[in-house]
Amino acid sequence: MINIQEIKSASHTLFVTDNSSFANTSALYSYALTLHKKVSIHTTEKIEQKLSFLPWFDKSRMKAPSSAEFIVEVESNTVALYEFFKQESIKINKKMATALYAGLIQEYDAFQSKECNGTIFAIASELVTLGAEYKECSRYMVNSLSLASFRLKSLLYKSMQLKDEAKVALLFISDEDLKASGAEIVDAYKTMKEVLKMVNVEEVRLLKKDENNKILKIIKDN
């Protein structure tokens, strides 16, 4: 997964990440610092505000430094990263535990996804024992809602249509909706997940209403 020897030998390591893998990047960055190595974080997209509580959020940059000797494309599989740390006998400190716990919340939909099992809960429990700021993770990643996201949600619910005996929900969004609310497309995806929890709804479609109702995303209750 990660070439530890490369990180140890390189004078400058660059972690490349996005929203889905930023929590894991935070854990890796914390580990690299214990090696007293120069490391940088390059984000390929704007990182969501809900992740701003994570260690090293302020170290991320959208412009990649040219001096990096070794580049790591960080993956979003938090369990694999946790198991990697264990296999390499790498001590998971408080910052790493918090980042990994946040990764589990993100990957397993606050432990509510169907893929979440006993192994995931066991890992989460161990991370809490290791000092993970689990309450902080929940506050920022589960219980917080930006005003922009709330504005967009109201627009999406207002435009919602139910088809096929309410089994299919259609949500409509435009560039103007995003601009007016100040939200981002990922906020629309969150609303889609909420709608999927409605009684009878088995599928949610997000349509671009200013592009002839082009389908942007579909999620199903599998």
Image (cartoon, grey):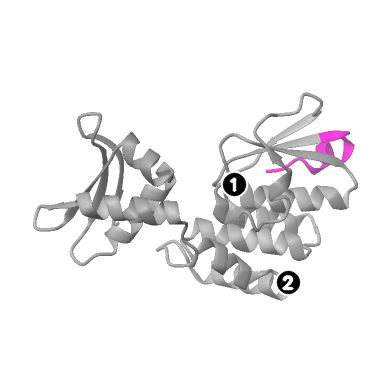
> Residue 103's image quarter?
bottom right
> Residue 79's image quarter?
bottom right
Question: For residue 121, which numbered disc appears in the image?
Answer: none
Q: For this view, does 157 lie left or right of residue 66?
A: left
- In what quadrant of the picture does the C terminus appear? bottom left
Identify the element where label 2 is drawn: loop
Give residue 62's position: percent from left, percent from top.
Answer: 64, 33
**Residue at the disc numbered 1:** 21
Q: Residue furthest top?
A: 66
In percent of the image, x 55 and y 45: which residue is there? 19
Query: How many labels, in total?
Result: 2
In percent of the image, x 80 and y 40: which residue is there? 39
Name which residue type carries label 2: Gly
Give residue 197's position: percent from left, percent from top.
Answer: 29, 64
Q: For this view, does 151 lie left or right of residue 167?
A: right
In percent of the image, x 33 and y 36: which residue is there? 176
CA separation in Å, label 2 and label 1: 21 Å
**Residue at the disc numbered 2:** 131
Magenta stretch holds residue 6: yes
Give residue 156's position: percent from left, percent from top.
Answer: 28, 50
Q: Which residues are magenta?
A: 1-12
Q: For this view, does 30 lie left or right of residue 147?
A: right
Magenta stretch holds residue 53: no
In percent of the image, x 84 and y 34: which residue is there? 12
Q: For this view, does 92 lie left or right of residue 101?
A: right
Q: Nearer the viewer, residue 187 or 134?
A: 187
Mark 1 Cα shell of 10 Å, populated few (<14), some (14-19), many (≥20): many
Name which residue type carries label 1: Ser
Q: Mark 2 or 1 closer to N-term? A: 1
User: Is 87 located above or below residue 110 in the figure?
Assistant: above
